[in-house]
Amino acid sequence: MISWKNIILLCSVIFIITNCSTTESKNIEASPTSGIASVTISPTAIRTITPTSTPIPVSPTPTHIPAVLPTVEELPENEAYPYLIELLHSQDCQLPCWLNVVPGQTSIKDAYRAWVPLLGIASHSNILSPEDGRIYFEYENGGVNVSIQTRYSLSADFKLIESMSVDTHALRKVGNSGAEEVYGAPYTESLQSYLLPDLLSKYGKPDQVIIRMEIAVAEPTSPDSFDIWLLYPQYGAIVLYTGPAEIIGGKTVQGCPSYSFVSLWLVEAGNNEMYQKTLEENSGIKGLSPTPPYFKSTMDALGMTSDEFFEIYKIPTNRCIESPLEIWPLG
């Protein structure tokens, strides 16, 4: 027989167990006003709490040049030409700088600021294009039309000028429809800083001097030509001098660097991958070295070392280069 004492003791134990169970449930189901996320415990799974902090926003990739650009005025024609010549002769603009723009450093806004003053003398311009950025100058001086054409590409984020290419030329009208190339003044006066003697004396011996002769046998009326490539990877500069070549005595090809036009390809200094890619795409030269049979070293083409070439042509001279005809492919 159960005594009243045992009955009372049993009821006390049941009360304690029931009260503790209720208290534990209340502690898990925290008050909505406590700021703590509610968690439900399941015998088979535990739900992970998802953070409520705002994620860091990711900026979308730009698809065009920023619309907000500096206010810059075009110069009148009588001021724009002298300003262009001043830029071309600037000692502060060292390769790979061109017209106050440096690949890999100059923003599109600063390029806009540098070039807009010259738009009044630009024959064609599209300096706000991410795909076909260009500015062309063609001006007449003493009956000679000097052409300076600049193209540029932008970085992936459309913020910086990534690379530039420059072509230069000079023509004089002959008759009603003809024209002849002019290698002297005013071309030499405009591009003096980029002619072979000035460039060699200013930047020193190139890493490579590469020669090419193009002999157009298949088209007798087409002129033959020579190319002299100067490779300055440390400056991010590829420099090309192109001029007419002449076959002498059926055995020798002759070309004169003093009768040549200059072209430039400019990339960020130190960006060797882009430099080699630019060189191969625009010349066919691979690995910063001559690729026979179309490209040859100065020794193979001219019988002189690159040091000898440098010493001869770093000062103004009318000396021409001569190469055996038989070593060149006939096109």
Image (tube, grey):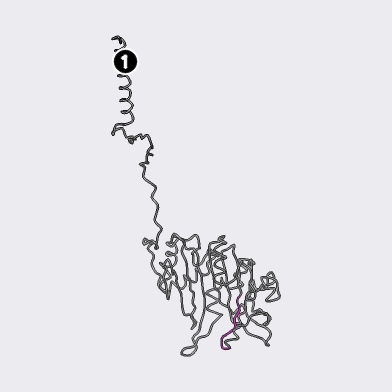
Q: Is residue 272 left or right of residue 26?
A: right
Disc 1 crowd, CA 10 A, few/some/many (<14, 14-19, 20+): few
Q: Quadrant of the C terminus?
A: bottom right
- Counting from the top left corner in percent of width and height, residue 236 is at 56, 64
On screen, 160 above or below 295? above
- Residue 122 is situated, as x and y percent measured from the top left of the image, at 43, 74
**Residue position for label 1:** 10
Q: Is residue 140 left or right of residue 321?
A: left
Res 280 quadrant in image: bottom right
Q: Quadrant of residue 220?
A: bottom right
On whether residue 224 falls in the magenta region, the answer is: yes
x then y, percent, for residue 262? 56, 74
40 within the magenta span: no
Nearest the viewer among 173 and 83 is 173
Q: Please determine whether, in this image, residue 146 is positioned above or below residue 201.
A: below
Q: Please report the residue visible at 57 percent of the width from the left and 70 percent of the height from the top.
A: 239
288 left or right of 80 in image:
right
Q: Residue at x 67, y 87 (%)?
A: 250
The kind of secondary structure element at disc 1 is helix
- Most extreme residue toward the front, as rendered? 1
Q: Nearer the viewer, residue 122 or 252?
A: 252
* Residues in magenta, as a range: 220-227
Residue lying at the far bottom in this picture: please name it: 175
Q: How many marks?
A: 1
Name which residue type carries label 1.
Leu
